[in-house]
Amino acid sequence: MDVIEILTAIGTPEGKADPYPLYAELHKLGEVVDTGLGELLVVGYDAINLVLRDPGYRVSDVASFEKNFPGWQANPVFVQAADWILNLNAPRHSQIRSLIARAFTAKRVAGLEPAIAKITDELLETMADRGADGSAVEFMQDFAYMLPVTVICELIGIPESDRDMFRPLARDLVEVFELSDIQKLPAINDAATKLLAYFTELAAKRRAEPRDDLLSDLLAVTDDRGAGPGGRPPGAPRKISDAELMHNLTLLLVAGFETTTNLLGNGLHVILHDSAAAEAARDESVPPSAFVDEVLRYDSPVQLTSRLGYDTTLCGISISAETSLATLLGAGNRDPRRFTEPGRFNPRRAEAGPLSFGGGAHFCIGSALARLEGAVAFPRLIDRFPNITAAGEPTRRETLTLRGFDTLPVTLV
């Protein structure tokens, strides 16, 4: 197969359902593959790692929006996305990211483990009640979604009574990362508008009555940053605007559970269909963190990201500022140059370091939390339901960038 044939196949429903054989075909063409369409596919592990860590490569920002999406300001989702740290380059990126990162210090994340364990056990008990008579339980809705959304909502400070609204809105909003169908744009814009209105109202409440939550902390810092009788002193960090904070809270909420939901579903799917993987999940000699890392490598919740080039070379190919690069994380995680038997699930493998959370300045800010949730959830799930089995065919989401399931029915007894 040539590169255009492979790309065409990846875009089909069958290719999205199982892109890995097509990634294997790309590996035969090299670490970096020129599509001939002004875009390079970066599929080798080392090449992806280099691109993500090299500050010369940039993400698409407002300048790219102006070039590629004329009239983008008419779409609320693009107005918000222009402030997302995913779409910012230095220095704005570091200014805003440094604030959001306050939520994910090693100490703060580690301190969440007892709460994550408690939430996990409560959700498992609810599942047990629903499946006690042997009827099927829907894992994605009843657990894979509920665990991370509860954790991120607790962290931000979103009241329990408001949480049911987020899944449909988040599911619509994340379509912006695919946007293969322009007909979906109105629903995406509607979700972005509703989420922004919600956070604006919640921020006003927290300013009036601060609580012990992340939103109150961020508001305190952004309201006070650089303040003083003489204004912001020379060299002090720029105060970020309310809009920048609200827009990134929307991103934080959605990213905070979307990736982890897919991680949990993809991992259970492996357990249900691979007896060796199921045994590894039960084997106490396999650290839960190693099991989670292998799920991330084997079936990454995020399959690709992108960068813009600069005047350099990559694997012998000349690159300029006009070059677009698609870094296929899912392909890099299956690179036979890096991993022995890349198509086999093996949490005991010597090679570590999945690319699933990116790298460099844009390394996923919530990666430690996602890993912790997986490391807490999988052992408890298998221990509570040692006889868990698939109950009919699951349905995959018809997406490529974000890889996961819509439904994953199981029986528990």
Image (cartoon, helix red, strand yellow):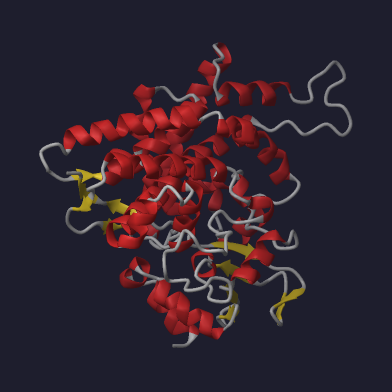
Horizontal side of residue 7 vs 305, given as left or right: left
* Quadrant where the N terminus is found in the figure: bottom left
327 or 286, which is in the foreground?
Answer: 286
Query: Total of numbered circles in the picture?
Result: 0
Q: Position of residue 346 (x, y in %)?
A: 44, 63
In the displayed image of the protein, which residue is found farthest to the front? 285
Residue 269 vertical position relative to residue 104 in the rendered view, above or below: below
Q: Is residue 301 visible?
A: no
Quadrant of the frame with the C terminus = top left
x%, y% of residue 20?
A: 42, 72
Relative vertical location of residue 394 with respect to residue 340 in this rendering, above or below: above
Of residue 45 and residue 248, the one placed in the foreground of this image is 45
Q: Looking at the image, which residue is at 26% across and 42% down?
A: 385
Furthest residue toward bottom:
1
Give me the residue at 57% from left, 68% from top: 326
Q: In the image, what residue occupies the spot 24% across and 57% down?
A: 394
Residue 375's place in the image compared with 24, above or below, is above
Residue furthest top in the image: 209
- Comparing 380 with 172, the one in front is 380
**Percent x, y for residue 238?**
77, 34
Rendered location of residue 161, percent (x, y):
35, 22
Q: Quadrant of residue 16?
A: bottom left
Q: Is residue 32 visible?
A: yes
Q: Is residue 72 left or right of residue 6?
A: right
Q: Residue at x 66, y 72 (%)?
A: 323
